[in-house]
Image (cartoon, grey):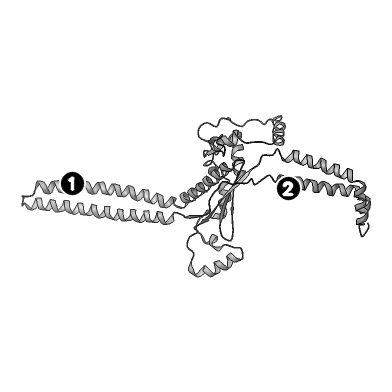
């Protein structure tokens, strides 16, 4: 092998074969244009959220700050929450989460599409000729259907049909979530062929995530509120019944001075007071439970709201064509100068 390549000889060889090189580059450019230009353009819209992670012990504040600067988040490990922000990306890919997105009403930028997100992905997606060819080839080898293809009625996320599974897969590929380990900043991105639909789904996916986390973190507190509300209502009904009984008896025996009547009236009054004390105590516990529910409800700060993108995110047609031409040039150069390089 030669230790050095004679650049003059390489340039001379290129000049000798310039028409062949130009023709090859022209063919590669045309081929790249034919390949990339039919591919539908897509847009990307994203939402950034800052979650409330809870209060950390003051004594660990400096240590947590030091760990954060080194790329670690001690706050995550110190939380008692089973679903930390680091698990949100996996959560958003689960069928139980995706099912909340399929019935989102979506409307295209030109207004021609106005349907649910499920039907939009099923019927209104543009496909490149290459994807259509691949689908046609795949259809020549049909798989045995595992269940009914109807999507009417309630979806069973435990057992999806082939059509439903395909739509769910499309949603999980279009709706992505990432979490910054240092700041715990949550970024939800949606990729779609229509800019308005991309922004709509990004906003709804953000809302659904916040609602899911809120329901999860407040599940026990909400159950406590329902429990104490039921007990308080029962105690109130018992107290009001006792109060009416005491009032009726006192009104009916106002002028009677017999000790037996007075004794019974005192018993009714004492019983009414006990039931009132029980109702008052339960009402206090109900208010405490409602305050606890409010305290447990997580807060998400929207750092970046969803917006309709003005420019497509891809495909990068010009970069693709330039890349193909450059690669073709390198290969062609290697072929015509192989005797000079080896």
- Visible residue check, residue 342: no
- Residue 319 image label: 2
Q: Nearer the viewer, residue 325 or 60?
A: 325
Badge 1 or badge 2: first in the primary sequence: 1
Mark 2 element type: helix
Q: Label 2 neighbourhood size at 10 Å, few (<14), some (14-19), many (20+)?
A: few
- Residue 244 image label: 1
Q: Tell us which disc is closer to us: 1 or 2.
A: 2
- Residue 18 image label: none
Mark 1 element type: helix
| Residue at 61% across, 32% down | 146
Q: CA distance from mark 1 to mark 2?
A: 84 Å
268 relative position to 296: left or right: left
Q: Residue 96: image x %, image y %?
A: 53, 43
Q: Residue 340: image x %, image y %?
A: 93, 53
| Residue at 65% across, 30% down | 144
231 relative position to 340: left or right: left
Q: Quadrant of the N terminus?
A: bottom right
268 relative position to 112: left or right: left
Q: Residue 17: image x %, image y %?
A: 91, 46
- Visible residue check, residue 58: yes
| Residue at 48% across, 48% down | 211
């Amino acid at each position: 092998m030669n230790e050095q390549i004679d650049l003059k000889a390489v340039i001379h060889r290129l000049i000798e074969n310039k028409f062949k090189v130009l023709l090859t580059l022209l063919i590669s450019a045309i081929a790249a244009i034919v390949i990339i230009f039919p591919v539908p353009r897509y847009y990307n819209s994203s939402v950034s959220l800052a979650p409330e992670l809870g209060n950390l012990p003051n004594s660990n504040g400096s240590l947590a700050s030091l760990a954060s600067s080194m790329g670690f988040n001690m706050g995550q490990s110190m939380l008692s929450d089973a679903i930390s922000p680091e698990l949100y990306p996996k959560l958003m890919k689960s069928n139980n989460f995706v099912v909340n997105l399929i019935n989102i009403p979506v409307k295209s930028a030109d207004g021609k599409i106005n349907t649910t997100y499920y039907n939009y992905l099923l019927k209104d997606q543009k496909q490149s000729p290459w994807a259509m060819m691949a689908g046609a080839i795949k259809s020549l080898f049909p798989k045995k259907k595992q269940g009914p293809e109807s999507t009417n009625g309630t979806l069973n996320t435990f057992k999806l049909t082939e059509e439903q599974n395909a739509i769910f897969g499309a949603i999980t590929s279009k709706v992505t979530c990432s979490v910054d380990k240092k700041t715990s900043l949550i970024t939800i991105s949606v990729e779609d062929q229509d800019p308005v639909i991309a922004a709509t789904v990004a906003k709804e996916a953000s809302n659904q995530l916040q609602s899911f986390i809120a329901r999860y973190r407040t599940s026990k507190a909400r159950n406590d509120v329902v429990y104490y509300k039921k007990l308080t209502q029962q105690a109130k009904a018992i107290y009001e019944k006792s109060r009416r009984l005491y009032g009726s008896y006192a009104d009916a025996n106002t002028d009677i001075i017999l000790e037996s009547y007075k004794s019974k009236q005192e018993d009714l009054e004492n019983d009414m007071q006990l039931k009132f004390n029980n109702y008052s105590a339960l009402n206090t516990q109900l208010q405490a439970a409602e305050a606890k529910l409010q305290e447990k409800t997580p807060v998400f700060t929207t750092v970046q709201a969803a917006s309709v993108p003005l420019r497509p995110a891809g495909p990068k047609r010009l970069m693709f064509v330039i890349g193909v031409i450059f690669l073709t040039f390198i290969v062609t150069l290697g072929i015509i100068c192989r005797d000079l390089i080896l």
